[in-house]
Image (cartoon, rainbow, N blue to C red):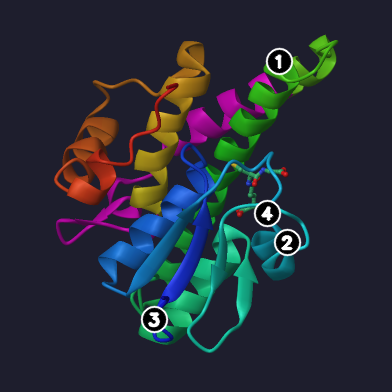
Amino acid sequence: MSNPNTYRLFLSQRSPFARRVRLALKRLQLPVEERIIDVFGDHPELLALNPLGMVPALRTPEGFGLFDSSAILEHLDDLTGAIWPKDRSLRVHIRSASTLVTGMIQGTVAFFQESSMHDAPSPFWMQDHHDTILRAKERILLLPRETWILEGNLTQAGWDLAVAVEYLELRMKKLAMPATHPIIEAVMALARKSADFTSSTPRLT
Ligand SMILES: N[C@@H](CCC(=O)N[C@@H](CS)C(=O)NCC(=O)O)C(=O)O
């Protein structure tokens, strides 16, 4: 029997978009019931919530259906004020870094789909996604530390970066973030203090 005060999150085991939302819900200590699905299966309850059939999708306790990880994070920020910093210029900077990291994740998903899920992968699109990831990665490594870590804690962009590091490692090892780069090292050390992070590392099996 589901609790009417609980959020219901549809996610898949390896979705980096679902993982960023799942980690935020856990950090905010919101009560959440998780529905882990195979996105390529048949899921009437997910489709009723999100006609796009994608994860993450969130049903709020009031019965609203929210989807797209960034839209869900905006809702959580409206609710708690704890996703983005209060200071406007810091907020603009960290939001935009989060969008950059999320775009890099999107490029990695697209590369994986093109290279592994098509009968005839397109060299053009694979190269295009590869170049997008490379450009994003280079920019990410130029951004200042406070983009990712503020007052000893990961920012939302920092959490997104930790999710991206492990997703790139899983899907595109050749373009993995340099583990010994001081920013990557610091971000991963903080993320790995969270049991919710370490227990949700995406794996192939
Ligand atoms: N922009 C969306 C992307 C979500 C997305 O691409 N989800 C993938 C899993 S990583 C999915 O559900 N794919 C299934 C499908 O395309 O039917 C977000 O940020 O939530």
Residue type at tag 3: Asn
Which residue is found at the position 63% from the left and 65% from the top?
A: 67
Q: In the image, 91: left or right of 47?
A: left
Residue 43 bears which disc, if any?
4
Mark 3: few/some/many CA within 10 Å (<14, 14-19, 20+): few
Residue type at tag 1: Ser
> What range is drawn magenta here?
129-156
Residue 47 bears which disc, if any?
2
Q: Which residue is mark 3?
A: 3
Mark 1: few/some/many CA within 10 Å (<14, 14-19, 20+): some
Residue 115 bears which disc, if any?
1
Q: Are marks 4 and 2 in contact (CB under 8 Å)?
A: yes
Foreground disc of the pair 1, 4: 4
Quote the CA–CA distance across marks 1 and 2: 27 Å
Residue type at tag 2: Leu
Quote the CA–CA distance across marks 4 and 2: 6 Å
Residue type at tag 4: His
